[in-house]
Amino acid sequence: MFKKILIANRGEIALRIIRACRELGIPTVAIYSEADRESLHVRFANEDVCIGPPPPSKSYLDPKRIIAAAEVTGADAIHPGYGFLAENADFAEICAECGLTFIGPSADLIRKMGDKSLARNIMRDAGVPVIPGSDGPVSDPVEAVKIAGQIGFPVIVKAAGGGGGRGMRICREPAELERLMSSAQAEAQAAFGNPIVYLEKYLEGPRHVEIQILGDHAGNLVHLGERDCSVQRRHQKLIEESPSPGINDELRQKMGEMAIKGCQSVGYASAGTIEFLLDKTGNFYFMEMNTRIQVEHPVTEEQTDRDLVKRQILIAAGEPLDFTQSDVTFSGHTIEVRINAENPDHGFRPCPGQIQTFHVPGGHGVRVDTHAYAKYVIPPYYDSLLAKLIVHAKNRDEALIRMLRALDEFIIEGVDTTIPFFRRVMQAPEFRSGQFDTTFVDRLLGTPSESPTTESAPATQDADATASGTAI
């Protein structure tokens, strides 16, 4: 087992990893920027190291500073959390070269699955259904128009190395494709340092359903069910739940089997997620793979009563999975909402500042993962996620009631938050019926759903996190 783990992240996920390490008996090192000096993850770690000024490029995204912190504190492993360097193959390689265990998959796997065009081809070759599209990157507008004509408009231009809705453009007309490709390439270059794009058929109003995977270094793989992530704004997840109200047991089993099949084809080892889009006729297609722990992992933890972060650490330490697929059972219904410091009435504009009052809900079936507290100052440099509110109940109807009760108890004063928005969602007939898709929020807010772009905001903590524009 590891002697000491450095956590290369901040906020609630850093605190979550500290708790898992403490239960495993592993000392932890927190790193922090000057803006995070008063964060709870700094307080609860065994050791802490300031690694630089607030901008991510000079702190949480600087491999040299992180490696130096690990070396000076004697850490022998690094947990990247989600976002920042969690899916950075170069960082995983640097860790290995410095004799540090990167708690995640190998650099080679991160590269393969991080290139969305390559990952798509890998899954297709493994027999996993993929959305019709180009066989690889597309740079020539004339070629792009030809490919789009073959697969049929509308199409979506997607950044090969992207995430979080950036570098994506929907195109409905051949005449618009060249302009939209250029725009997507420019955004992808700015956000990810990689302008490569490819084309896929655009699915109208799909559901977004992901499968949680765990794999060890002995070749054992299991899936832990699905999470429905269809409640999104501009391709940023807002609510996750399990089981998905949009699929039946037969489809659930088939999606799980396909996720395992895809991971087996690359020898995947660690925690990961296979993401699918489900069309209105019940057909599902591989979208991407996230080679890290997800923001919404507590949903699966509540459904299966298994600690995913602890298991991820044990896998990285060489421990085999101590259970098989037949041992995985599911209980009740779980819903998670992301409480962000944002103003939903003004385009989900981030609202940094000082929290005056902070009271979290409690009671049976209620879980809150947060790093915030009264008088905590929310810095403007990172994503605006304050807390994850998770409720578990015996069925979906009871989970909805419990979530509304918990939202009413959650009191945050001093900054705007998304709590009022989620109260509205929980009472919306379309959401309560379970008959929603990825365009639901646009209909609820009366906003156009055609643009998959995100607002400008600081990069990058969480690649699938919030509507703040972060590139997770």
Image (tube, rainbow, N blue to C red):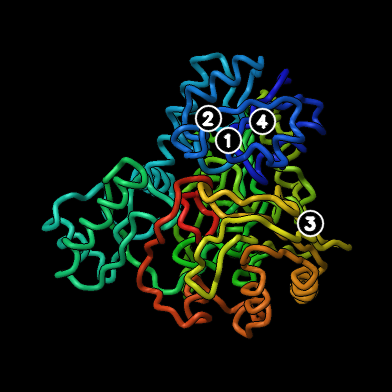
Q: From the top left corner, tell me how far across and down residue 162 is, in percent.
A: 38, 48
Q: Are marks 4 and 1 in contact (CB under 8 Å)?
A: no
Q: Earlier in the sequence, mark 3 or mark 2?
A: 2
Label 1 vs 2, first from the N-terminus: 1
Q: In the rendered structure, are the residues bearing label 3 and label 2 in contact, judged by CB atoms less than 8 Å apart? A: no
Residue 177 in percent (x, y) is at 19, 64
SS category of the residue bearing label 3: strand
Q: Which residue is mark 3?
A: 367
Work out which residue is located at the far left of the displayed protein and give it.
142
Q: CA distance from mark 2 to mark 4?
A: 13 Å
**Of the residues tagged 2 and 4, which is closer to the observer?**
2
Choose the circle earlier in sequence order: 2 or 4. Answer: 4
SS type, badge 4: strand
SS at mark 1 in the image: helix
Give the percent coordinates (x, y) of residue 406: 79, 68
Q: Quadrant of residue 20?
A: top right
Location of mark 1 (residue):
34
